[in-house]
Amino acid sequence: NDFPVPKPYGVNRHCVVMERKEAVPLNAVREIQGDKEGKIFGKLMRLMVKLAEHGLVHCDFNEFNLLIDERGEITLIDFPQMVSIDHPNAKVFFEKDVECLRNFFERRYGFIPDSVPSFDDVVRAHDLDRQADASGIFDEKERDAMREVEEYFHREEGSEGGEEGEEEDTQEGEEDEEEIAEGLMRAAVAEGKEDGEGDEAREAGLSKREKESQCTDGQKEPEEEEDEEEDGEDGEEEGEDNEEDEKKALRRSKKHREGTGEEEEKLSNRALKRLQNSSTGGNRKNVKEAVKRKLAKQKKKGTRNNVKDRESIRLGKIVKEEATSY
């Protein structure tokens, strides 16, 4: 077939004895004299196409398996990995060989070709692949079976990809709903804080007036009681401080117990109202459920805090009683 390959002399199992060529691998050539890079590159591309027209793809057509002599003549070596052009991956192997050699000439010699051959342009002229019993040769029944197997795997990959895509979309949708719910809750909490600032101010003013009233009611004429109260001043001050602390703790606990349901209801109404007025593109029903889940978590947390407050008050009373008994 007039291919530039070494002449074989004998074969024994996996060893082939061939003639010696006075040439070096293309990889060892640092520079090509006379600006012949394009000429040599074109010769190599024509050799690759000629192989394909005879039914073969080399699959390792690179600078290590191409020998070049002083005259610029090419010798091709290393054939065990060759496949038939009927192989399912023949096109991939062919284009890989072309790209590998093109990159080498550009990197080593600075040569960039105007065009390279394409596997789709190859027209079979001989059946050297069948003579050599190359990998990838199938009869009609085998080719049909291969096509069926490939179609089956394509269908499986497509269905798996669709399921994964649906799972990812569902996960992303849930995350978006959670983010929207969290944003609504934050906004509702902010509104609740603004509303609560007035209540706290009113409560602080009321507490101050109560203190002043208590001081006024309990005040006696200093001139008449000065001598009588001199000895018990310190004890009374301590008792008043303790009593005031206990009242504060009881008010705080009562506020927590009584206000939990009311505050949660206000928070829920504010969050859901924001949901109705918002222009989110998500599923409003799912976001509403997410808001309710957030509120349930906060309610559970608030219940635990109330239990802690009640326990603290109970322990405070016990400590006070023991201190009094001593």
Image: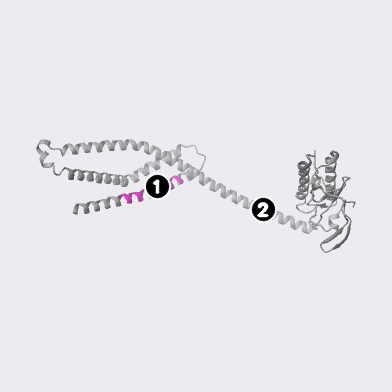
Which mark lies nearer to you, 1 or 2? 1
Q: Three-letter amino acid code at disc 2? A: Arg
Badge 1 density bin: few <14, some 14–19, many ≥20, Cα 10 Å: some
Residue 272, position as x, y percentages in the image:
43, 41
Q: Which residues are magenta?
A: 290-310
Rendered residue at 76%/42% (across/down): 107
Residue in the picture at 56% in, 50% down: 167
The three-letter code of the residue at mark 1 reads Gln
Please tell me which residue is depicted at 19% across the width and 52% down the height of the picture. Answer: 324
> Number of labelled discs?
2
Q: Position of residue 23 (x, y in %)?
A: 86, 50
Q: Is residue 221 visible?
A: no
Task: For marks 1 and 2, give the CA distance.
Answer: 47 Å
**Residue 31 placement: quadrant:** top right
Q: Which mark is residue 298?
A: 1
Q: Which mark is residue 123?
A: none
What x and y, as percent, mark residue 61?
A: 80, 50
Q: Is residue 187 left or right of residue 306?
A: right
Compared across the picture, whether 269 is left or right of 213 comes to: right
Image side of residue 13 versus residue 197, left or right:
right
Mark 2 highlights which residue? 155
Mark 2, Cα crowd under 10 Å, few <14 / some 14-19 / many 20+, is few
Left or right of residue 205, residue 296 in this image = right
x and y percent of residue 243 in the render? 22, 45
Dot 1: element: helix
Is residue 300 highlighted in magenta? yes
Please report whichever mark, 1 or 2, sits nearer to the chain's N-terminal start: 2
